[in-house]
Image (cartoon, rainbow, N blue to C red):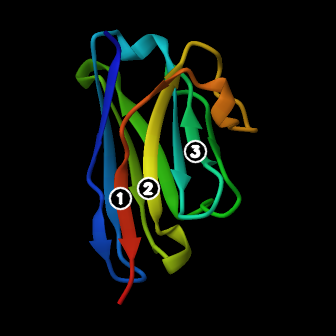
Amino acid sequence: QLQLVESGGGLVQPGGSLRLSCASSGFTMGSYAIGWFRQAPGKEREGVSCISSGGGRTNYADSVKGRFTISRDNAKNTVYLQMNSLEPEDTAAYYCAADLRPCRATMNPHDYANWGQGTQVTVST
């Protein structure tokens, strides 16, 4: 059974950093594109970043470019999202998702078939 588990969320002050992890079990993560998405209360789920199966291609939402970095270690079946210079607007539940289709710049949640349960990120004083 394909499973994804996110970790690393928490409460951080504006300007701080967090690193999210997405660990997989039940499948070979290296065959899948992985996306990070977030959903704030009352808002639609939006794409944050994605990375191709081999790690050579990445995409970022304009709102996080220059602040977030996605990476993967296929040997550890884990994808990371390094988040720096966090802002209150980054507060949301963050989800990772896997799909066999390529990582596209559109990062449409409907393109991803397999989802984790999410981890909460709160940026506040």
Marks 2,3: beta carbons within 8 A: no
Which residue is farthest front? 42
Taking the image as shown, residue 36 lies to the left or right of residue 24, namely: right
Query: In screen coordinates, is 94 left or right of 4?
Result: right
Give the residue drawn at x 44%, y 43%. Answer: 95
Instruction: State the residue at coordinates (58%, 62%).
Output: 66
Question: Which image quarter is the C terminus in?
Answer: bottom left
Say which label, 3 or 1, has the lower sequence index: 3
User: Which is more toward the observer, 27 or 75?
Assistant: 27
Q: Amino acid at mark 3?
A: Ser
Residue plotted at (53% across, 52% down): 38
Q: Secondary structure at mark 3?
A: strand
Q: Provide the secondary structure element on which disc 2 rests.
A: strand
Q: Amino acid at mark 2?
A: Ala
**Residue under the point 24% across and 24% down:** 76
State the residue in front, 50 or 116: 116
The image quadrant that residue 18 belongs to is bottom left
Pointer 2: what residue? 93
Quick one: label 1 or label 2, which is nearer the N terminus?
A: 2
Q: Which mark is residue 49?
A: 3
Q: Position of residue 119 (x, y in %)?
A: 34, 51
Depicted 16 relative to depicted 76: above or below: below
Q: Earlier in the sequence, mark 2 or mark 3?
A: 3
Q: CA distance from mark 2 to mark 3?
A: 14 Å
Q: Is residue 87 above or below residue 105?
A: below
- Could you tell me which secondary element the residue under label 1 belongs to? strand
Tally the numbered discs. Answer: 3
